[in-house]
Amino acid sequence: MILASLLLGVIVGALLGLVGGGGSILAVPALVYGVGLPLEEAIPTSLIVVGAASAVAVLPRLRTGVNWRLAGIIGAAGIPTAYLGALVNRLVDPQLLLVAFSVIMAIAGVRMFFATPAATGPCAPASGGIWWRSCLPRALATGTVVGFLTGLLGVGGGFLIVPALALVLGLPMGVTIGTSLVIIVINSAAGFIAHVSDVQIDWAVTGAFAGTAMLTSAIAGRLSRGIPDRILKTSFAILVLTLAVYVALRAVAGWLS
């Protein structure tokens, strides 16, 4: 279990550092199928891993790669809905949730393939500043949805935050990644608190997974600053579509078994 945690932590940390997301949606299946944890333990464990790795990955971007106002608004909006998602998680068939989840991922991935002008949305207009009348409702809606999914499925939400920041709010990809990582830290903390009272955490597995994820995310975060926005965006789209297919297949297999 420890060896598997170390290896999988490298993958999750690299994804978070390079594209600001993706590692969170991998963490739960990695802990369940790769490490062997039960789902109820894998969810809060994944939130520890993803939150810690995201906090480290954002360090190289603290000065110029984070829109702090948007990160705070979106993160705060998601805190109450993370608790609501955790409650719904106990009531709904998880296989049904995973199918819906994969559809959302596929839509987000396809949208990321389409070119969008950098810094031309309501939250990053070409003239500078922020058009708060248009930006604030979108930011609050993004935070609400992502927070709910964090509690519902035990993910940090980066797979949705990145497309939302880039496509809906109009942030350039470089700022999108850093801002996404800050929001993931906030959402992961809220989701963990909502889940942790129900389970015991295997701290040896968690430490091994989180330690390698944090180290790898720090390295990947520095490397990603030199990669053009278009390459990062396309890579993220391919990643999300691949994960959508994987999640859908696992859900169908769960129904058939």
Image: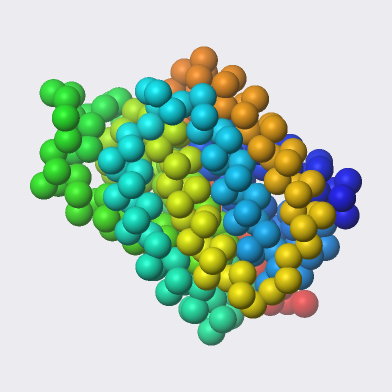
Say if residue 134 shows up in the picture. yes
Measured as percent of width and height from the top left, residue 132 is found at 14, 43
Farthest left residue in view: 133
Measured as percent of width and height from the top left, residue 79 is found at 40, 62
- Could you tell me which residue is drawn at 22 percent across and 37 percent down? 123
Q: Is the residue 212 above or below the residue 147 in the image?
A: above
Horizontal arrangement in the rendering, residue 92 relative to residue 161 (left or right): right
Quadrant in which the N terminus appears: bottom right
Residue 22, by quadrant, is top right
Horizontal arrangement in the rendering, residue 120 relative to residue 26 (left or right): left
Q: How many marks?
A: 0
* Near-viewer residue (88 or 246): 88
Residue 178, by quadrant, is top left
* Near-viewer residue (62 or 17): 62
- Could you tell me which residue is drawn at 28 percent across and 40 percent down? 69
Say if residue 111 shows up in the picture. no
Measured as percent of width and height from the top left, residue 62 is found at 43, 28
Q: Is the residue 153 above or below the residue 75 in the image?
A: below
Measured as percent of width and height from the top left, residue 39 is found at 70, 69
- Could you tell me which residue is drawn at 83 percent across and 62 percent down? 36
* Colour mapping: rainbow
Quadrant in which the C terminus appears: bottom right
- Could you tell me which residue is drawn at 59 percent across and 20 percent down? 223
Residue 154, by quadrant, is bottom right
Q: Is the residue 133 above or below the residue 252 in the image?
A: above
* Near-viewer residue (189 or 170): 189
Horizontal arrangement in the rendering, residue 18 relative to residue 170 (left or right): right
* Near-viewer residue (105 or 158): 158
Q: Is the residue 237 above or below the residue 243 in the image?
A: above
Farthest top residue in view: 226
Horizontal arrangement in the rendering, residue 40 relative to residue 181 (left or right): right
